[in-house]
Amino acid sequence: MRLLLRWALNAATLLLLAIYLPGIGVSGWYAAFVAAFVLGLVNAIIRPILLLLTLPVNLLSLGLFTFVINALLFWFVSTVVDGFEVDGFKSAFLGALIMTIASWFIGKIFKKHT
């Protein structure tokens, strides 16, 4: 149940990004849910591989290159999902940054207390 709620909140965050951030567009709730799902898959599968492959650059930049990777993956998801559009790298960078912060915050809220 927590997973579905986190997914819905990430989709809502994408919709809010589309409203308040120029350069990002989401056609509706369905596109937001699909984009949130694909973003989750990409961040779980592709992102660790890219972080490992770019480890030397990431070390030289003191971890700041991770923001570039997040932006590129956010932009990539917009090319895969219909109804989710990102106009340029600047929009992708800001959108990925806000989504990362929102996802972290949502994760902290729904963290299991063991």
Image (cartoon, rainbow, N blue to C red):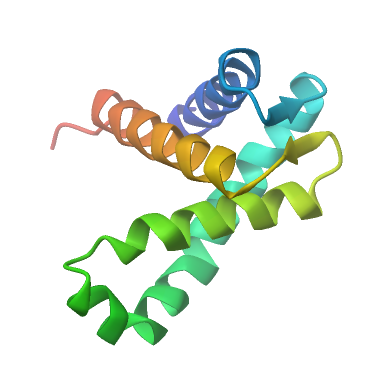
The answer to which image quadrant residue 34 occupies is: top right
Q: For the point 73% across and 27% down, which residue is it?
A: 25
Q: How many marks?
A: 0
In this view of the protein, which residue sits in the foreground, 8 or 75? 75
The answer to which image quadrant residue 62 occupies is: bottom left
Q: Position of residue 61 (x, y in %)?
A: 22, 70
In this view of the protein, which residue sits in the foreground, 1 or 18? 18
The answer to which image quadrant residue 51 occupies is: bottom left
Q: For the point 62% across and 38% down, which residue is it?
A: 36
Viewed as shown, does residue 35 lie left or right of 65? right
Q: Position of residue 6 (x, y in %)?
A: 47, 29
Q: Position of residue 98 (x, y in %)?
A: 41, 32
Placement of 56 over or under 111, stated as above or below: below
Viewed as shown, does residue 5 lie left or right of 58? right
Residue that sits furthest to the right in the current view = 82
Q: Position of residue 63 (x, y in %)?
A: 22, 65
Q: For the point 55% across and 31% down, which residue is it?
A: 7
Quarter of the image where the C terminus is located: top left
Viewed as shown, does residue 29 lie left or right of 21? right
Viewed as shown, does residue 105 lie left or right of 17? left
In this view of the protein, which residue sits in the foreground, 1 or 78? 78
